Amino acid sequence: MSEKPIEQINVGNGIRAEAWRNETKDGQEYFSVKISRSYKADDDKWHETNVFSRDHLPKLALASNMMFERLIERQYGMNHDEQKTEGFAGKETAKRAKKKAARKVETEKD
């Protein structure tokens, strides 16, 4: 895991999602995501927790969805709307995205 997150999203109420790039032993890329909440305690110091109240859940879902979209775009070069129309199927989606980009380049050359 890299020392610093490659992506960070703040969605309010101290809720933040961070992602790190990792590699398996055989060189396959994958991402780890941490979602946390910062708060100022009675001791006037900032703390971080992974405990959320019911009212935090919409922001938690937002942070999760936004991070998912950023990681899909980073990994496959497509945004979430493109991914939904292509159908997400891991490596096959990446292959289709690369072929689509290659066809676009060929068309632009003509």
Image (cartoon, rainbow, N blue to C red):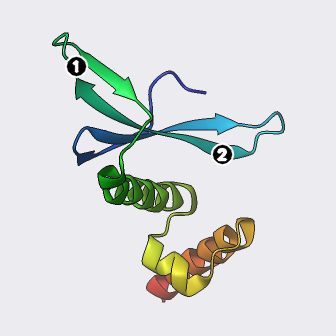
Q: Which residue is mark 2?
A: 30
Tell me whether circle 2 and circle 1 mark residues in contact (CB < 8 Å). Answer: no
Indicate left or right for 32 with 73 as reference. Answer: right
Task: Tell me how many marks there are.
Answer: 2
Label 2 element class: strand
Indicate left or right for 19 with 58 as reference. Answer: right
Q: Choose between 103 and 79: the one closer to the eye.
A: 79
The answer to whether residue 105 of the structure is visible from this angle is no
Q: Residue at x 53, y 81 (%)?
A: 84
Of all residues, the one furthest to the left in this rendering is 44
Label 1 element class: loop
Q: CA distance from mark 2 to mark 1?
A: 35 Å
Q: Choose between 74 and 16: the one closer to the eye.
A: 16
Q: Quadrant of residue 52?
A: top left
Q: Residue at x 33, y 60 (%)?
A: 58
Of all residues, the one furthest to the right in this rendering is 26
Q: Amino acid at mark 1?
A: Ala
Give the image location of residue 63, x and y in percent. Answer: 37, 53
Q: Residue at x 36, y 25 (%)?
A: 48
Q: Which residue is mark 1?
A: 41
- Indicate the quadrant containing the N terminus: top left, top right, bottom left or bottom right: top right
Give the image location of residue 105, x and y in percent. Answer: 51, 78
Q: Amino acid at mark 2?
A: Tyr
Q: Choose between 62 and 58: the one closer to the eye.
A: 58
